[in-house]
Amino acid sequence: MSVLVYTENWDGKFKKLSFELVSYAKQIADRSGTTVTALSIGAVDEAELKKLGNYGADKVLSATDERLNVLINKAYASVIAEAAENEGAQVIIFANNFTGKALSPRVSVKLKAGIASGVNAVPSSYDPFTVSKKVFTGKAFANVVIKSDKKILTLFQNSVEIAETGGDAAVEVFSPALNDADFATKVLDVNKITGKVLLSDADVVVSGGRGMKNADNWAPLEELAAELGAALACSRPVSDEGWRPHEEHVGQTGKIIAPNLYFAMGISGAIQHLGGVSSSKCIVAVNTDKDAPIFESADYGIVGDVQKVLPELITAIREMKAS
Amino acid sequence: MKILVCISNVPDTTTKIRFTDNNTAFDATGVQWIINPWDELALTRALELKEASGEAIEKITVINVGPQTTEPTIRKALAIGADDAVRIDAVPEDAYAVASNLSSYLKDNPYDIILCGIDSSDYNGSLVGGMLAEFLDLPSVSSVSKLDIDGGDIKLNREIDGGSEVLSTVVPFVAIVQKGIAFEPRIPSMRGIMMARKKPLNVVPSGGEAALTEFVSYDLPPAKSACKMVDAENVKELVDLLHNEAKAI
């Protein structure tokens, strides 16, 4: 028996998200009296794999066949299911990101394991196995009972504390059976975003709405983001107008995020937008309309014109950093 | 070539979410029901592909797993332009049961391209498309923001954390689509609404496996404390608060 956690890598490196997943797996394993096995797929060096031990992985399986250097859903799901069976995993954990959403449902069917996706806490009960997840785009939480013997959880990012255990993980090579028929999908080209903080990694997010007036007004938002090491985001009208790429759209039909600090600049706060950002730990809103719904969800607010407030905000942050 | 679009019947995205029966059930009182937004985009892209294909794409079918109350939403999909519809007569208890029901129908009624939205705006599972692909042993490409058919070649763009990729795959396959797949959803025309009444909506009995999970109760997020307002003439105070009080910067 064990808890298996799939730890994705980005160009051979793990991220904060990976360590959060292992920390989460460790809490469940401790409570169940079992161990944590992390599974890594793709080329990751031993020193990097060893890092997972520091967050509670007892063992790290490393599958490095070069056909697995790109994500092919069908092939990866077979690899993960095989590892889960070898390890006798009762609980399998994924991130609730694009990769986790791609793979976890396939593994669920392979293992007949019930899934709770987008969970935001450790299970509240282990018998019956009950865990809380976000529903209605963050407008509510559901308590889900998983009835099958094997269980899959996909963890919503920034849900649990990362805890260093100082542990050491044994790294083992894992050579899964690969089936040619699983590789019918091919990756032809990869376009990586470089030189920008990714929305999925960001502790601080600077977001612009219709109140920014037009695409040419984004420079001060970019400057604020650079000052804070923040990622850029936008509301739906902004991406629909083509002022910003749709990858930056946060809200019900875009990305759901939970940073430590979210700046809503010229965003009125339609219910669909709030769903995507309401789990942010601190929300700052600047809007000309004092009755804008965003102020009901914000922690700090300024009624004013974003174009006027932004340069002053940047100056004040620089002064604060300099002092 | 035939395209299937899986649609979910969900509360309008502006719905105020409430629960009933001691927080064990969603309160559907007064709720307007719509096609799940991503499924609507999938349908829109399917129609664009069909129109551009000449005769190559002969049919677009929409399918839903749900009780009879979902039929107005299915009719809307027909009004937007789907050629026919299937409703599998079952209460959608969880993603596993829904995908199992879909797969049991599709094993006897195959399609070349199966489109699912990446998420449903009610229970936010992001699961049915991937599960369906696995039940049918088909390739799946997820977080798809672009889908093109050039002759027999299928080309897709998918978003990954930190970029995007261009992929090819082979029919039959499942594409799990998100924003970008179509610019904006189509709205039914008056003619479309009239025609939708005459289009076939086939009801088939449930034939899937039982659910593996159960949603037992719901909680609303704790009420937010009042927003602390800062004067627009004193932006420095905001930075002080974020630094010293919120400890966020």
Image (cartoon, coloured by chain):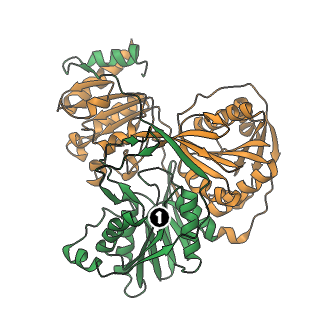
Chain colours: A orange, B green
Comparing B102 with A261, the one in front is B102
Residue B16 image offset from top left, x and y in percent? 31, 43
Three-letter code, disc 1: Cys
B222 in relation to B194, above or below:
above
A88 in relation to B178, above or below:
above
Q: Is residue A53 left or right of residue B180?
A: right
Measuring 49% from the left and 45% from the top, which residue is drawn there? Answer: A194
Q: Is residue A109 left or right of residue B81?
A: right
Measuring 36% from the left and 80% from the top, which residue is drawn there? Answer: B83
Is residue A213 visible in the rendered image? The answer is yes
Residue at the spot of label 1 = B116
Residue B229 image offset from top left, x and y in percent? 25, 20
Could you say whether the residue bearing mark 1 is in a helix, strand or loop?
strand
Q: Is residue B27 left or right of residue A27?
A: left
Q: Residues within 10 Å of mark 1 (few under 14, many from 20)?
A: many
Which residue is farthest front? B21
Measuring 75% from the left and 51% from the top, which residue is drawn there? Answer: A84
Residue A83 image offset from top left, x and y in percent? 76, 52
Q: Is residue A225 left or right of residue B131?
A: left
Query: Disc 1: which chain?
Result: B
